[in-house]
Image: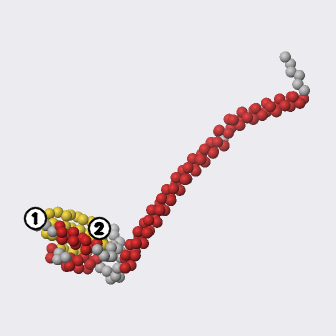
């Protein structure tokens, strides 16, 4: 069977075959080329969105930290410029009648700034209520004193109260 096609039909057939070949080539090329690039871009975009959210959380944490630091600085500004942690703790020991059972000394670890003065307090034969009252007085007011470390809190050797070794710290401007 022979096909006798006129010129117009031959051109239409050639264009149809060319269109079919182009569709097949594009059906193979698009998933391999541009679609793969699009999917990679989509993954990168998702990753960057996650990183942006993480950076936003870091920013919120930093803002919160700065607000807390601002509050601490306001407390330090209210404190008298000649504040001495040693004198403050010594005065509280006298006020609470613990001076006779206490040893107070300056404390200086190796890697601590000069802006963080510390004192070590050793109490002997102190009642629990006396210790709690003393700690309440230390934290009372706007002096910004904190416990740096508590080495021990144990019953006294003579079983008349507690022995304790505690280190206090503060900040200076």
Instruction: Tell me the element at label 2.
Output: strand
Whether residue 117 can be seen here? no
Image-based side of 83 in relation to 156, left or right: right
- Residue 66 in the image: x percent, y percent? 44, 68
Q: Position of residue 58 (x, y in %)?
A: 47, 60
Residue occupying image coordinates x 58% and y 50%: 45
Work out which residue is located at the far top of the displayed protein and give it: 1
Sequence-first disc among 2 and 1:
2
Q: Residue at x 25, y 74 (%)?
A: 137
Q: Nearer the viewer, residue 22 or 95?
A: 95
In the foreground, 68 or 13:
68
Does residue 78 show up? yes
Label 2 vs label 1, nearer the camera:
1
Q: Which quadrant of the figure contains the C terminus? A: bottom left
Q: Residue 26, relative to residue 94: is it above or below?
A: above
- The residue that disc 1 covers is 159
Taking depth in this image into account, of 22 and 59 the one nearest to the observer is: 59
The quadrant the N terminus occupies is: top right
Q: Residue furthest right?
A: 6
Residue 17 in the image: x percent, y percent? 79, 30
- Within 10 Å of disc 1 (Cα), the crowding (few <14, some 14-19, many 20+) is few
* Residue labelled with disc 2: 148
Measured in 3D between alpha carbons, the distance from the residue under mark 2 to the one under mark 1, in whole angstroms, is 27 Å
- Depth check: give the residue in front, 117 or 96: 96
41 to the left or right of 79: right
Task: Check disc 1 and report its element: helix, strand or loop.
Answer: loop
The residue at 29%/67% (across/down) is 148
Q: Which residue: 22% across, 72% down?
A: 134
Q: Quadrant of residue 76?
A: bottom left
What is the number of the mark on residue 168? none
Measured as percent of width and height from the top left, residue 171 is found at 34, 74
57 with respect to 44 (left or right): left
């Amino acid at each position: 069977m022979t096909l006798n096609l006129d010129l117009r039909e031959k051109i239409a057939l050639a264009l149809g075959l060319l269109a079919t070949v182009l569709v097949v080539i594009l059906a193979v090329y698009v998933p391999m080329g541009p679609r793969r690039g699009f999917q990679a871009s989509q993954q990168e975009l998702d990753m960057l969105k996650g990183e942006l959210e993480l950076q936003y959380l870091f920013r919120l944490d930093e803002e919160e930290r700065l607000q807390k630091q601002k509050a601490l600085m306001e407390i330090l500004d209210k404190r008298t410029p000649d504040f001495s942690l040693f004198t403050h703790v010594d005065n509280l020991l006298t006020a609470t009648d613990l001076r006779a059972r206490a040893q107070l000394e300056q404390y200086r670890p190796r890697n601590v700034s000069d802006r963080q003065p510390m004192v070590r307090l050793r109490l002997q034969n102190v009642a629990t209520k006396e210790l709690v009252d003393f700690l309440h007085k230390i934290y009372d007011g706007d002096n910004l004193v904190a416990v740096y470390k508590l080495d021990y809190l144990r019953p006294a050797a003579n079983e008349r109260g507690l022995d304790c070794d505690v280190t206090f710290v503060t900040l200076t401007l």
